[in-house]
């Protein structure tokens, strides 16, 4: 059968459209197509799923399908060198008694066999971690009775040396209480046995390769929690390095504690009850983001503990982190201060 001129035109147009569609699809697959086309085709393209807390991929493997597990880790000279922080996705630093601080170390993409020294819980922990799961999963060494009761009433999945003993070990070469360590892989099994929700979390932070603006050059930062505790950071070889006595903080495996983002969140500490501060994790406040050797000023907002804290620039745009690991400094408004060096 012969085609009419109109039929030939339609056939040529259809072929051209098909070639164009294939071409655009190929471009979208490689990430170079028009944004509108990429949005349409993204659900049909099989891509490696990134880790939800870092937006990084694990080579050709999808991120593991498992929950966030938080571990309380000490932060004193007696506890050093710390173990397992090099595998963390996100680390929080929070104020405790005596002007000291402790780390809340979050694992999702990696599950190291030795993290510690593990220390006790505080009443601030449930509200902080509820952003990642409800109820959150926390491993700690214990706590005062009233703190334990508070954490229990908050519905937290508590993994301790008593409730999850197979995950914990004592290092006899270390002096107590700085000798308790835990395996995150074993914590995952213990959490499953305890009936925890084992699904992966939704992303908490916004990520982008593009630096939010306006920004200013920053090569160092000094973050004071109290008269006795100051966290210092230095921009070195493309990452933010934590300092101890003016030198890079060395971990047990010989690496330095370094991250891609330092997110500073100014919070209100209302009062202390015993050794535990009572913190306002809801409301709003100032925030600063250190990334790419720059500092961006912004604000945070969290309407309720059921919501995730959102971070925006002073103009209202997303305060987007660079894909990678993040250290969040929870600085008290009453006793804290923040400064940057160029």
Image (spheres, helix red, strand yellow):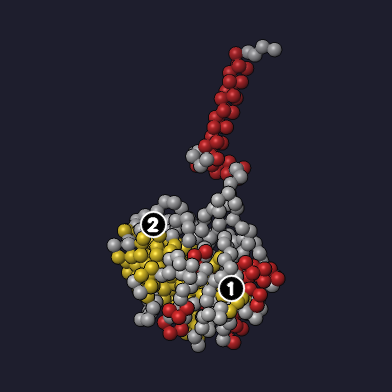
In this rendering, which labeled residue sits more in front, label 1 or label 2?
1
Q: Are marks 1 and 2 in contact (CB under 8 Å)?
A: no
Dividing the picture into quadrants, the one containing residue 248 is: bottom left
SS class, disc 1: strand
**Image check: 311 left or right of 341?**
right
**Image check: 192 left or right of 285?**
right
Along the line of sight, the residue nearer the viewer: 303 or 199? 199
Q: Tag 1: Cα neighbours inside 10 Å, few (<14), some, or many (≥20)?
A: many
Residue at the spot of label 1: 182
Relative vertical location of residue 283 with respect to residue 41 in this rendering, above or below: below
Q: Quadrant of the N terminus?
A: top right
The image's mark for residue 238 is 2
Along the line of sight, the residue nearer the viewer: 70 or 295? 70
Which residue is located at x 52 percent, y 55 percent?
55
The image's mark for residue 13 is none
Q: Position of residue 240 (x, y in %)?
A: 40, 62
Q: Is residue 315 visible?
A: no
SS class, disc 2: loop
Q: Earlier in the sequence, mark 1 or mark 2?
A: 1
Relative vertical location of residue 314 with respect to residue 141 in this rendering, above or below: above
Which residue is located at x 43 percent, y 85 percent?
98
Q: CA distance from mark 1 to mark 2?
A: 30 Å
């Amino acid at each position: 059968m012969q085609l009419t001129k109109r039929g030939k035109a339609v056939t040529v147009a259809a072929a051209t459209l098909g070639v164009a569609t294939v071409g655009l699809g190929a471009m979208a697959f490689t990430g170079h197509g028009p944004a509108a086309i990429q949005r349409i085709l993204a659900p049909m393209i099989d891509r490696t799923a990134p880790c939800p807390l870092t937006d990084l991929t694990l080579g050709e493997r999808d991120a593991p399908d498992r929950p966030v597990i938080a571990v309380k880790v000490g932060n004193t000279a007696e506890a050093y060198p710390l173990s397992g922080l090099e595998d963390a996705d996100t680390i929080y630093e929070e104020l405790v008694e005596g002007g000291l601080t402790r780390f809340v170390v979050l694992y999702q993409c990696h599950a190291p066999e030795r993290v510690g020294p593990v220390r006790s819980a505080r009443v601030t922990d449930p509200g902080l971690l509820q952003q990642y799961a409800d109820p959150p999963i926390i491993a700690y060494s214990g706590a005062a009775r009233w703190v334990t009761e508070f954490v229990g009433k908050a519905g937290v999945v508590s993994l301790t040396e008593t409730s999850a003993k197979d995950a914990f070990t004592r290092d006899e070469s270390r002096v107590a209480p700085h000798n308790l360590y835990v395996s995150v892989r074993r914590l995952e099994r213990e959490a499953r046995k305890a009936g925890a929700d084992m699904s992966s979390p939704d992303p908490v932070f916004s990520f982008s390769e593009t630096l939010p603006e306006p920004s200013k050059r920053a090569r160092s930062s000094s973050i004071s929690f109290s008269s006795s505790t100051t966290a210092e950071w230095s921009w070195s070889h493309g990452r933010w390095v934590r300092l101890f006595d003016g030198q890079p903080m060395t971990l047990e495996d010989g690496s330095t504690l370094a991250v891609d983002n330092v997110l500073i969140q100014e919070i209100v500490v209302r009062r202390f009850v015993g050794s535990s501060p009572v913190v306002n994790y809801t409301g709003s406040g100032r925030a600063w983001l250190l990334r790419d050797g720059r500092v961006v000023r912004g604000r945070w907002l969290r309407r309720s503990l059921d919501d995730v804290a959102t971070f925006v620039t002073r103009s209202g745009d997303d305060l987007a982190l660079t894909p990678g690991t993040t250290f969040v400094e929870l600085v008290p408004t009453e006793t804290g201060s923040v400064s940057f060096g160029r």
